[in-house]
DNA sequence: CGAAACGTTGACCGTTTTCAATTACAGTGG
DNA sequence: CCACTGTAATTGAAAACGGTCAACGTTTCG
């Protein structure tokens, strides 16, 4: 219902796999766009480096997601992509893909759907930032991530990474975690969170 | 180079224009999606109302932009659209448009391009929120908006609206404005800002 | 002309950021 | 197998900053 078989958009001969070690760069800001990448395993952090040297996480891609759709129409990447843990990516050559898009309506529609989803997700993230209180923001984030009943979240990356994603310091996150736990809003076992009530 | 002639995607007979007065709603969260809207004049604010009653600006569309692309694949709107000043919108019926998209590859590609741009813009907004200091964030925002040399920004809406867009209170914005001015980073004449140095 | 929105500034308070220090833990190489 | 090292996790205390509340001048528009 979700996967559209991105890898089937182009004949396998056109694919090219690539492995990335933790911290390795898939592409860099300013580099010309050569391909559209699909993440098979691991997670990729898209980040931009501000003038003052600060790094900003724009997005964290998870397995199954397609990267750089936004770059399909751009000449150069507008951010860095760095592997967060070892990654496995599939590269679809830009030129070939563009041709496929111009030919097959289904392919284009599928791309649009992907992009539409990203727009929604980004707006959700943006909305999150408008919650000023750290505990409430974290709770809101957990609600977005949660699944099942009772709703639970299994975090698969360090909290300090989560912290930058939601725009807080890791200290603030730990404190918020404690507050929520003390208030009985969540239950915590290491990186497994269970939401209570509400 | 920018406009793709959205209104030419469907025969004019299928269009339907609509006028909105300041504050009027184009659509409301939860409402079924009937059409894809294009903004001809004025600006439309997409906002969501949080549980606690706070309103959150998700996006501000300007003339020429297409709204609700993200909703083309959704059953219901996920935010409210309220006119900010008098607006003129063109409505393209969802059903007809979907058919066009499935038929004409060019149409789909154009849609993808629009969505891709939105993704970029949203990421930029998100990046902005990671700047914790109010003056620096405002400055960053001004840099994004600026054009010409020396770079200037002519703000066409009240500062309090700008404030919510960048995630600050209007008071904080005024103070930041003063700080930047005192520091010589900007020059201000009402709503006309000129960036200095750096 | 009057009301409502915009613009502006001050003071105070609460929270988060910072800075700092300590523990826990996983991976590495001797 | 165990020090050794770097990252993650935690907690404390103080400082900084923006939010909130409040008051007031100004502009806009019906």
Image: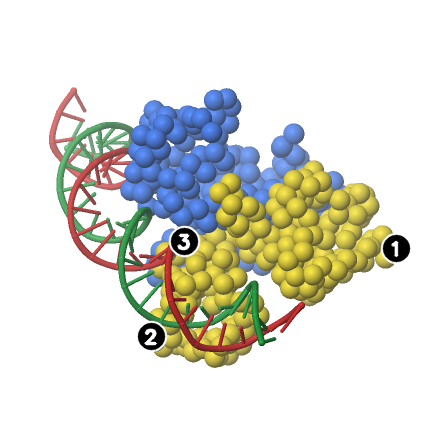
Chain colours: A blue, B yellow, C green, D red
Residue at x-position 45% and y-position 62%:
B170
Q: Secondary structure at mark 1?
A: helix
Q: CA distance from mark 2 to mark 1?
A: 56 Å
Mark nearest the camera among 2 and 3 is 2
Report x, y in % for residue C8. 41, 72
Q: CA distance from mark 2 to mark 3?
A: 22 Å
Residue B120: give its label: none
Report x, y in % for residue A106. 74, 40
User: Quick check: do tags 2 and 3 share a chain?
Assistant: yes
Visible residue check, residue B151: no
- The residue where tag 1 is placed is B13
Nearer-N-terminus badge (2/1): 1
Q: Secondary structure at mark 3?
A: loop
- The residue where tag 2 is placed is B183
Q: Chain of mark 1?
A: B
Q: Secondary structure at mark 2?
A: loop
Nearer-N-terminus badge (1/3): 1
Visible residue check, residue B100: yes
Residue at x-position 64% and y-position 58%:
B23
Left or right of A50? Residue A38 is right
Residue B130: give its label: 3
Is there CB contact under 8 Å for labels 2 and 3?
no
How many numbered badges does the structure rendering display? 3
Q: Is residue A16 above or below residue B81?
A: above
Q: Residues within 10 Å of mark 3 (few under 14, many from 20)?
A: many
Left or right of B18? Residue A51 is left
Left or right of C29? Residue A3 is right
Q: Chain of mark 3?
A: B
């Amino acid at each position: 219902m979700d996967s559209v078989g991105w890898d089937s958009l182009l004949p396998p001969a056109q694919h090219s796999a690539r492995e990335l070690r933790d911290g390795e760069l898939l592409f860099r800001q300013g580099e010309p766009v050569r391909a559209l990448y699909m993440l098979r395993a691991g997670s990729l952090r898209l980040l931009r480096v501000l003038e003052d040297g600060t790094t900003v996480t724009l997005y964290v891609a998870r397995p199954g997601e397609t990267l750089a759709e936004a770059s399909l129409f751009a000449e150069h990447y507008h951010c860095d992509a760095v592997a967060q843990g070892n990654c496995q990516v599939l590269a679809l050559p830009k030129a070939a893909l563009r041709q496929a898009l111009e030919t097959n309506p289904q392919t284009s529609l599928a791309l649009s759907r992907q992009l539409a989803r990203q727009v929604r997700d980004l707006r959700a993230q943006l909305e999150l930032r408008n919650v000023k209180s750290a505990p409430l923001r974290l709770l809101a984030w957990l609600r977005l991530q949660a699944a099942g009943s009772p709703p639970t979240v299994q975090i698969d990356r360090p909290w300090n990474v989560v912290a930058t994603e939601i725009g807080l310091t890791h200290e603030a996150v730990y404190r918020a975690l404690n507050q929520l736990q003390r208030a009985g809003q969540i239950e915590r076992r290491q990186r497994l969170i269970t939401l209570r009530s509400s």
